[in-house]
Image (cartoon, rainbow, N blue to C red):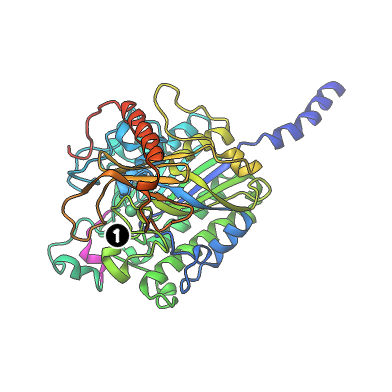
Amino acid sequence: MFRFALFILLCIPCVAETRQPNVVVIFCDDLGYGDLGCFGHPTIATPNLDRMAAEGQKWTEFYVAACVCTPSRAALQTGRYPIRNGMCSSKRRVLFPDSKGGLPASEVTIGRMLKQHGYTTHAIGKWHLGHLPQYLPTSHGYDSYFGIPYSNDMDAAKTAPKGRTRFNDPKTEYFNVPLMRGVDIVERPANQHTITKRFTEEAVKLIKDQKDSPFFIFLAHNLPHVPLFVSKEFTDVSRRGLYGDVIEEIDWSVGQVLKTLRDEGLEKDTLVVFTSDNGPWKSFQQQGGSAGLLRDGKGSTWEGGMREPTIFWWPGKVAPGVVMQPGSTLDLLPTIAAISGATKPADRVLDGFDLSPVLFEQADSPRTDMFYYHGEECYAVRSGMYKAHFKTKTSYTGQKEAVTHDPPLLFHLGHDPSEEYDIAKQHPDVIAAIRKRKSEHEASIEPVENELTR
Ligand code: MG
């Protein structure tokens, strides 16, 4: 009996120390690199994100793997460039309400990986990896789903004003988007004034309900993608106008999530990541965000289209500081596998790296390369501090055809983060090395059925 009691006593600390961490990924839609106070915005107040950045790690060179919604989300969920799973196309760049395709069942999402490891898994908000039942989060390893399955500007109502005028003074009834719980539509059109608030309430409730076992929450806000909507409480609060109001409500939402983790005593057991799917939709002018000092925005492979304001937070574990090295949403699946002990898929090419040594030990980032895709085509490559553009196309601003560059344009992202000064002529050796790297990467791609054009 004594021996048994001793065994139990000795094991209690082991159990406490080996609790698998909870993970919360907060993912915005079309948020620009320069839209947060802690990333330099002068008139948008984000005190909760600023505090999160001060307590955690602020990453200044964190990338998504595509410059538009659907392929970017496929990359985050699978740790693979979307060219590997059929989730990118130059003809149809994202999924639409009439699309028949979605993320193939053979792909392993972060949700599926963690569910197989004993986590409860929850997706909230925008999914955009297929809205038919077989593609929704509940078919991809998530126990629950509550959200709008694609972009909040889709399903324009016949009675809505034509073209972009419907975005100027947007009304809920102009956008007949569904709000879903599981595979059922529970509201249509979704009242978008309250979606940020309701997605937040869902996350808070899940944290409270699931606190006794490890959980994963993917909280993907539909905003600040246009049309812009805010709740009554956040109307006219920002010096940046309606766009700023939307960001300040998202900041409030982040504060609610972190406060709940603290109140429930989970802050030392939970990794929280904040980032976004692509850069600001600049052609919407003041309704779109800002990429700060980065060039261009959503839809382009310039830095403004694919570099996102990113924060990692886990008090007592993540070493506070600023990381000025590359990371990517591609790295989230391997990083989460490493910290949870889950098994990442071994039967396919993964493009992500485990960032946990950077998070916990301030080691150098294992990521040195980034491939910038526009549809199925790799337009640019970052290798170390150099970035070569083989093709460029500005974002949604009327440029019909991409421009090919031979030799490619070359920029040093340390000296010239705004990509203003082409230094290709001075560095033929760098260009040769990047060409080789690009060829090696492209040789690793196997053809798959395109899911966006089905
Ligand atoms: Mg987006």
Q: Is residue 195 visible?
A: yes
Q: Quadrant of the C terminus?
A: top left
- Image coordinates of residue 363 in percent, x first then y, are 62, 40
At numbered mark 1, what does the secondary structure look like: helix, strand or loop? loop
- Give the residue at mark 1: 190
The image quarter in which residue 416 lies:
bottom left
Question: Is residue 29 shown left or right of residue 185?
Answer: right
- Image coordinates of residue 261 in percent, x first then y, are 60, 53
Q: Nearer the viewer, residue 237 or 330?
A: 330
What's under tag 1, amino acid-wise? Ala
Q: Residues within 10 Å of mark 1 (few under 14, many from 20)?
A: many
Q: Nearer the viewer, residue 73 or 323?
A: 323
* Vertical side of 209 occupied by 87: above or below: above
Q: Is residue 27 visible?
A: no
Question: Is residue 223 shown left or right of residue 41?
Answer: left
**Residue sitting at x 43%, y 64%:** 35
Give the magenta-colored segment's residue range. 170-178
Question: Is residue 93 shown left or right of residue 72?
Answer: left
Q: Quadrant of the N terminus?
A: top right
- Image coordinates of residue 377 in percent, x first then y, are 26, 39
